[in-house]
Image: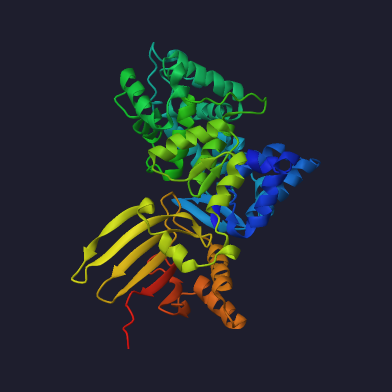
Amino acid sequence: MIRIYLDWNVISSLKRPEFKEIKDFIFKHKKHLQFPYTPAHFTDLMKSYNPNNNLFNVDLETLEFLSEKHFLRWEKDSVKPLFGPPSEYFEYEKNKDDISELMNIEKVFEDLDKSLEDIGSGKLGNLMKSLFQLQPSGVEITDDNKDFIKKMFPNLKPDSTMWDLMKEMGPFSQKFLQDGEYYKDFRKTMSDYGFKLESNSGNWNYDEVIKNIDNFLLKLGTKMTYLEYVETAFKHRKEPINQYEYYTTAYLMLDMIGYKIDKLPKPTDNMQNIQADGEHSFYGAHCDYLIAMDKKLRIKSKVLYNEFNIPTKIIEPKDLISELTIVLDDIHNKENFLNEAIGFCNENLLVQSYPKEGEEAIERYAFKLPKFYFNYFNYVIYSNYPEQEGLVLTFKKVFKNFSRFIYYTESETLIDTITQYFGYDNDEELEFKKNEFVYGDKEVTFDWNFKGGLIRLEKEDHTKRPILNYILSTKKEKDD
């Protein structure tokens, strides 16, 4: 299946008449397309939540139609491929606690003591508060930064304690996240302090943006690259920065220093809009395509994808049909599969050659496929065995982006597609073997013999992902 990430604006727009052609195209090819949903989609969706808002229900139904149950979410150290419908996740979002309560540190510690009283323990929260009151805040207020500090923490003084700082952090974080005007004013203050890119930065080529920002930081005297500067946001934390935090912070920092800034024009817009866009970009990096209406989301993603060597292709909705028409494999009109497969092994598609191995001098070459072969494979490895007078074409799904996983449904769909194309007479045996192939640990293969060769669908040893082998004899038949 081709994994496609749609930003929220695209999903919501599918209910509009002018998007009917795109929706019909998706419906027609749905079997071979995967549209995972993420928490970032719900950040956008829940803004319009109202029990009486019928359009909200339409958007939720559209999300469920597209994604079915394919759900991506960051958990601890990586993005996990989870399985559950958006309607279930909506119930979680609808009932989750208001995060603003967690920003009131006084209340958090009071609640801690109340919960401990119920089990007969002492006032741990009060003790911790006393310890924090004995520590200095660690914030040095100078003539150069006092106005900036005042804007962030209006009640902080040179002799303030760590407890005073903790009390100030809650209101600042809440305003920073939820008050669009406060965020824009904060961004302007940074600009006034000289922390803003030149006005021409919007015209930079995407592959020069990070290099130009590095030069900008150097001129400011920071002696840090842009990505090193991103890391400083976490320097006071004991836990190491993870991939999700690193990427989304890098995305947000682009906006804060003035690159393709989000103007946040609506009264309900705030910094969480930009955070959600950063998450869309991050989750999109786990897919084959990121399709976005928002031009700034596309450009910022292109900048970061280039920096992190992510090959995810970024396109506009208007290009969806033409692009997917090229890369979808038309199974029904596939005639001479062998000639087609061998035709993929040409120098224009060559991406890597491997050193010859051992005395047998085995030749190996890797080719990037011009389409998703059987709507799944994206690379083919050509291996020539001169001693055995044979060659093997191995079709694989290779991940160059952030993703390192496939869903069970992808293996199931691939098996269905290939067995329908090459044929399989025993339906009961097919279902048994498919179930064992996808969910079991045993070695399972699907084989088709033909004159001069063998077709084998099996699991790769180390990844357990499906691979397709065409094993061909190059031995010339001798005359009688």
Please report the residue visible at 46 percent of the width from the left and 80 percent of the height from the top. 449
Which quarter shows the N terminus? bottom right
- Classify 385 as above or below 428: above
250 sits to left or right of 90:
left
394 sits to left or right of 164:
left
Frontmost residue, 92 versus 193: 193
Frontmost residue, 452 versus 207: 452
Q: Position of residue 288 (x, y in %)?
A: 50, 50
- Classify 255 as above or below 355: above
Query: What is the image's colouring?
Result: rainbow
- Classify 450 as above or below 79: below
**Picture quarter containing residue 297?**
top right
Q: Is residue 114 visible?
A: no
Q: Position of residue 452 (x, y in %)?
A: 40, 78
Q: What residue occupies the far top of the structure in this picture?
A: 143
- Classify 8 as above or below 263: below
